[in-house]
Image (cartoon, rainbow, N blue to C red):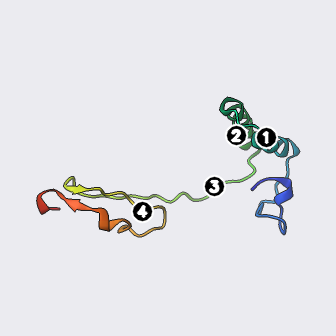
Amino acid sequence: MLACSQIPPNGFNINFYCNKQLDSLYAQEEATADPNARQQTFNQIHGIYLTQFPFITLYGAIDVSVHKNTTQSYTPGSEGAAETVGVQNWWCTNGQC
């Protein structure tokens, strides 16, 4: 998303951030299947993110979900999803929720 080639109208780099070193690291990461080599590349990419600030996160949604211990098979919905996602899978210990 932050590649130079992804600046609109060609992509979704809405920050219009362009860093040729990042482009090179993205290509390097995509060209290898070795997990250790990929991790090293990701670490370098992350280092650029931490020092160059190509984007700033202004908002992080808090997803708080609460349920009783007697509710079984409960999993919260994804961000922005209704709290009743997967309700068909819930059940209560001894029928008491």
Residue on which the image places disc 4: 77
Task: Residue type at mark 1: give it.
Answer: Ala
List the residue tagged with mark 2.
Answer: 46
Q: How many marks?
A: 4
Sooner in the amino-acid sequence: mark 4 or mark 1: 1
| Percent x, y of residue 16 | 82, 59
N-terminal-most mark, 2 or 3: 2
Residue 17, percent across and down?
82, 54
Mark 3 belongs to which amino acid? Thr
Q: Is residue 11 left or right of residue 56?
A: right
Disc on the earlier residue, 1 or 2: 1
For badge 4, the amino acid type reads Gly
Which marked residue is nearer to the observer: mark 4 or mark 1? Answer: 1
Q: Are marks 3 and 4 in contact (CB under 8 Å)?
A: no
Residue under pointer 1: 31
Q: Which mark is residue 15?
A: none
Tell which of 12 and 37 is nearer to you: 37
Residue lying at 80% horizontally and 39% vertically, measured from the top left: 28
Is 45 drawn above or below residue 90 in the view shown? above
